[in-house]
Image: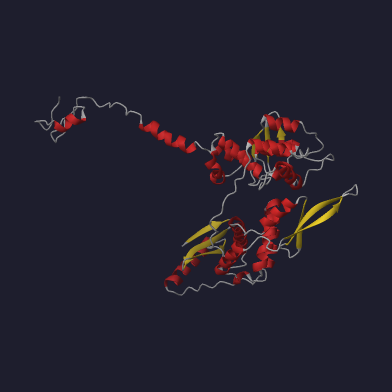
Amino acid sequence: MAIYQRGQNWYIDFKFKGRRVREAIGPSRKSAEKIIAKKKTEIAENKYLDIRKEPEPVKFNDFAKEYLKWAKTNKKASTLKGDLSTMRRLDQEFGEQNLNDITGWQIEKWKSKRREAAKRRDATMRPFLKEKKDGTKEERWIVEFNSPRRLRGKRVFKARQEAEAHIKRLQTPVKPATVNRELSLLKHLLNKAVEWGRVRENPAKKVKPLKGEVKRVRYLMPDEIQTLLSNCTEHLKPIVTVAVHTGMRAGELLGLQWSQVNYEQGIITLQDTKNHERRDIPMSETVRSTLKGLKREGPFVFCDEQGKRFGRIQTSFRTALRKSGIEDFRFHDLRHCFASTLVMAGEDLNTVRELLGHKDLTMTLRYAHLSPDHKTRAINVLDRVMSQKPPQSEIPQKAVSLTYGYHWLGDEDSNLNSRSQSPLSYH
């Protein structure tokens, strides 16, 4: 049991039946000391009553709205966008339920059900003819599916091959990584409910994430990168070039402004990063020449002729991939190309971590297997150390013999066979 001061108020802090209890007493230290002494006596005499007021019931979908309001203020816009999509899926399972009624067992069952489900089992594909400006018609393919908003969603593709590949992705089982992201958001939401006094405890606290989550590392070889660049449109090519040579994320690239580019120091400074920390990226000659070749139409580096920044580049990027014959590749994988190329060239993982902006080595270690020599170099250190001859002993050849009757002569074998007649003698 203890008392402590925070600000102008004093608090008592003790444990009862394994649960930590903290109560605010007021500005008086003496009052806090008296109350905690009383609590101690009540517990010792088995008279302490653990009376806690039950929070008012609140439905999951109502509290989700409160959580998203908080997230809008405290999270990045890109993170919030992902949270909105995930929250719609969680709402399908827990929406009308009171937070107090959600159990850990229910969350475990939901986790298993999500793992076995397909992304969009009902996805369908159909062709249609799109009329062009010159009056001619061109074949397009539409993929339709039911979205988490309970609306009919669709995506349009130019080639049947792209539409079929998208259908295949939609009908595959949900990956463990997806389920774990949804579970992570559910846990955080319930933690906030506990923090804000809406529930007593978090039922998802002891629910463990799914195993088998594989960190994706898809990268291109140098010749494939050159093929991709040759098929990029005029506005896309400099974006892909800078992405490959800096490891910047899509949002960081499209939001890059000229004020962040310092030619004198040769660095690009990123302020609004994913982990909210500043990152300085050195510019290679390729990046420098690429940026200097762009026209300054406004504050943004990558923008149209009116100075408006590019919003989405997925369509043009998919077209470049199709022309290059590259499959199963996303724009974010260009970041993997940057890191993988450095690691395979022999750069140490900590340097790669700093360039990527990772807070620790956990994320960067996914590239460790690409360094063919790093383990061999480590093992070879043992050969070098073990093969070194030990330093010559500085012990003098003549020394005082021990009381056991042995003489130290400087030679290990001779000492085993030498005995002194005197318990203490000099030689």
- Can you name the residue that lies furthest to the left here? 421
Give the colour scheme of this rendering: secondary structure
Quadrant showing the C terminus: top left
Given residues 142 and 298, the one toward you in this image is 142
**103 relative to 416, above or below:** below
* Corner quadrant of residue 333: top right
Judged left or right of residue 2, residue 246 is: right
- Along the line of sight, which residue is nearer the eye, 372 or 55? 372
Comparing 261 with 209, the one in front is 209
Placement of 331 over or under 30, stated as above or below: above
Q: Is residue 265 visible?
A: no
Indicate the position of residue 417 as horizontal and vertical percent values: 14, 32
Taking the spot 49% from the left edge, 37% from the top edge, the residue there is 374
Q: 44 or 413: nearer the eye?
A: 413
Is residue 216 at all visible to an observer of this figure? yes
x, y percentage for residue 100? 60, 71
Residue 202 spot, x, y in % from top left = 57, 65
Q: How many marks?
A: 0
Q: Quadrant of residue 219?
A: top right
Q: Quadrant of residue 414?
A: top left
Q: Residue at x 67, y 71 (%)?
A: 96
Vertical comparison of 236 with 56: above or below? above
Up-down: is 338 above or below 166? above
